[in-house]
Amino acid sequence: MVLVFAESPRGTLKKAAFEAVTYGKKTADLLGTTCVALTLGTVKNAGELGVYGASRVLNISDGTFDHFDSQAVAAAVATVAQKEGATVVVLSHSSTGKSVAGRLSVRLNAGLVSGVNSLPTVQGAALRVKKSVFSGKAVGEYEIDSAVKVLSLMGNAVKPVAGGAAVSVENVTATPTGRIRVKEVKTQEGTVPLPEAEIVVSAGRGMKDPANWGIVEDLANTLGATTACSRPVADSHWRPHHEHVGQTGIAIRPNLYIAIGISGAIQHLAGVNNSKVIVVINKDPEAPFFKAADYGVVGDLFDIVPRLNESLKKFKAAH
Amino acid sequence: MYVSLGPAKVGFTFPGISYLNHSFSNLFKMKLLVCISQTPDTTAKVSFKSDGKEFDAAGVQFIMNPYDEWYALVRACELRETLGGSVTALNVGPATNETTIRKSLAIGADDAVRINADPQSAGFVAKQIAEYARIQNFDIIFLGKETIDYNGSEVGAMVAEYLDLPYISYASKLELNGNTATLERDIEGGVEVLEVDLPFVVSAAKGMAEQRIPNMRGIMTARTKPLVEVAPVAYEESAKTVQFTLPPAKAGVKLVDPADMDELVRLLHEEAKVI
Ligand SMILES: Cc1cc2nc3c(=O)[nH]c(=O)nc-3n(C[C@H](O)[C@H](O)[C@H](O)COP(=O)(O)OP(=O)(O)OC[C@H]3O[C@@H](n4cnc5c(N)ncnc54)[C@H](O)[C@@H]3O)c2cc1C
Ligand SMILES: Nc1ncnc2c1ncn2[C@@H]1O[C@H](COP(=O)(O)O)[C@@H](O)[C@H]1O
C-alpha cells in the first residue's frame, strides 16, 4: 500500500496535497497496489482526496494536530504506516514535508529521497526516482531498496488528476507527542504562496525604485501570478523578504517565470531555472539571463511591461 | 545553561543518560552545536566523473555551506556572546575539509569536531551527528536549512528524530529567554511564530543572523583552538545514487520584437501553452 500524508495548512487541503495523492495513486498503480491518504487535525475537505485517487481517506481528528509539530506528525504518520502496512510513504516537499520526511525515514528505517520530481520506476523490490540537484544544475537518480520507502514530492512536478470520486473519511487515532507551542501564523491571504504559484512575475534592481512596482503588480494581477524579486531588492527592503527567490531565497518551479530587470546571476538562476518557461525582459542584450530564457525582449522595462499588460488584458478578454 | 525539568520533559531520557544528568552538569553553561558542511562554491561548474556516479571535484573551489556559515554559526556565536557557554562546530568529512572547519573557528566557534568519514548520504551524516550529540547533551543543535549541492533538507529532521528532540526547520529568527526559545519559521507564503523549550534542533534560514567576515584576530586564534577527530559509527545505506546527468541545454532564447507584445502573448499561449 502507498500511504500519502496529505497536508492541510490551516484546515484546508490544497494543491500540494492533491499533487501528492495523484503521485501516490500513480505509484500505487505501478506497484499494483492501492493508495491511502492520511490527514491530520480538523480538515474541511478530506473526502475530496478520493477524487485524486485515494481509495481510503483516514483522519486523526485530534485538534492538537491543527498546529504543526514535526515530532507529532512524524509519529502519527509512522504509526498509521506501520498499522496499515505501507511500503511507500509520499509527502509534499513543503515546509511541513521537509521537517517530517527525515524523521519518518529514521522511524520507519526507510530510505528517503526528498524533492522527487517524476514518477518512480520499479526495479524488482527497489524504486528508482529522480530529483534536481546542485540548485537545478544537474539531475540525480537514486535507488531505494529498503522495505519501506519515503518520497517527498517537489511542488508543481505533477499535475493533480481528478479521476475518482469523493470517499467517506475513516477516523483513526494516535497520541500526539509534540512539544512545540505555535503562537501565531502570519500569512498573506489572497495570494498563492510562491512555491505553489504556477505563474511568477519577478523584478530586480532594474526597477530603480520601489515606487515603480505598480507596473509589476498590474502585470501579476492580469496573469493571476505571484510576485517575486531578486536578492538585492529584498535586502534593500524594496520588497518583503518572502519574495526573494534564488539560492539564498526560495527555490520555485512555476510553469511561467517572467523576469523583469534582473541580470540573471548564477545565484538567482539557482532558484528559478527549474521553471518550465522563462521570459526575460532586460535592456541589456548581454544580460546573462537571456542564456537561460525561452523568450526574451530586449528593451526598456518601463515601456515594455505596461504594453505587455495591455496585450494580456486583450487576450484574457478574448479567451 | 540551566535546563529545568519542566513537566513536558519528565521521563525523557537518552539511552543510558538520564535527562537529570543533562540539566545539572551543565548548570548555567549553554552548550551549542553547529553542524557545518562543505559545498562547491556557488559559481562552480557542475560536472561528474565518467561513470556519472560522483561529482567531479577537479578544479572546484569549496566553501562552507552559506546557510551554515552566515546564519546558523553566527546566531550560535551571538547567543554565546550574550549568554555565555560554548559553540562547537561539527563536520562529517575527510581531512581535506579542515580549511572550512578552521574558518568556523575563525568566525567564532570555540572548538571543532571532525567525524572522519566521507559524507555519503544525509542518512549517514545524520547518524554520525546524532551519535556524537547524544553523549554531549547540547542545548541547541543548529544546522543550515539545506546544503546547496544536494539540496536535501534532510539531515536536521533525521538528527532530531534520532535524539527524540523537537525540530524547527527554516527558522528566520531565534530569541532565547531562560529555557524557552521563541522562533519564527518560514512557511509557504508567511511565517509561523512558535515557542519551544531547550533542548531542540533548528535549521537556519535567511534572517536569523547577518554574515560575519572573520577578522585577523579570529583567524589567528583559530589556529590554536581544539579540533578533535572522531571515528564514525556504522550505518547501513538504503538509498544509493544510480547516476547524475546534466539537464538538456536550453534550445536558445527566442527574441520577440519589443514593439509587438501581442506576439509574445501569442507565443506564450500557442507555443509554450503556459497561459
Ligand atoms: C552566495 C550568494 C548568494 C546569492 N543569492 C542570491 C539569491 O538567492 N537571489 C538573487 O537574486 N541573488 C542572489 N545573489 C546575488 C546575485 O549574485 C546578484 O547580485 C543579484 O541576483 C543581482 O540582482 P539584480 O539582477 O536584481 O540586479 P543587477 O545585477 O543590478 O541587474 C539589474 C538588471 O536590470 C537591467 N535593467 C536596468 N534598467 C533597466 C530598464 N530600464 N529596463 C530593462 N532592464 C533594465 C540591467 O540591464 C541589469 O541586467 C547571491 C550572491 C551570492 C554571492
Ligand atoms: N557533512 C556534514 N557535516 C556536518 N553537517 C552537515 C553535513 N552535511 C549536512 N550537514 C548539515 O545539515 C544541513 C542540511 O543538509 P541537507 O539535509 O544535506 O540539505 C546543512 O546545512 C548542515 O548544517
Image (spheres, coloured by chain):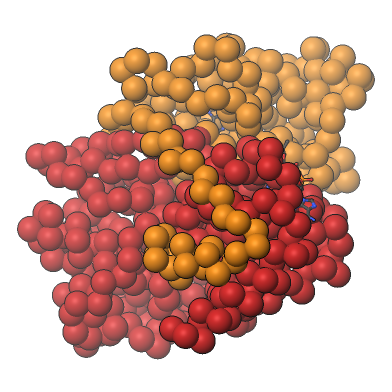
Chain colours: A red, B orange
Asked if residue A268 is positioned above or below residue B60 in the image, the reply reads: below
Indicate left or right for A265 with B244 as reference.
right
Seen in the picture, residue A59 relative to A256 is either above or below; the reply is below
The residue depicted at 86 percent of the width and 62 percent of the height is A209
The x and y percentages for residue A234 are: 77, 56
Query: Between residues A275 and B275, which one lies in front from this camera angle?
Result: B275
Q: Nearer the viewer, residue B13 or A143?
A: A143
The answer to whether residue B240 is visible is: yes
Which quadrant holds residue B77?
top right
State which quadrant residue A175 falls in.
bottom left
Residue closest to the eye, A58 or A62: A58
Q: Is residue B72 visible?
A: no
Looking at the image, residue A192 sits to the left or right of residue A231; the answer is left
Q: Nearer the viewer, residue A261 or A149?
A: A261
Q: Give the image location of residue B103, x and y in percent.
A: 74, 22
Q: In the rendering, at what x and y percent does residue A76 appear?
A: 35, 66
Kindly identify the residue that appears in the image at 36 percent across and 29 percent down: B244
Looking at the image, residue B270 sits to the left or right of residue A122; the answer is right
Q: What is the tally of numbered marks visible in this picture?
A: 0
- Quadrant holding the C terminus of chain B: bottom left
Spot occupied by residue B139 in the image (x, y as percentages of width and height)? 66, 45
Residue drawn at point x = 76 percent, y = 57 percent: A300
Residue displayed at 51% across by 16% down = B57
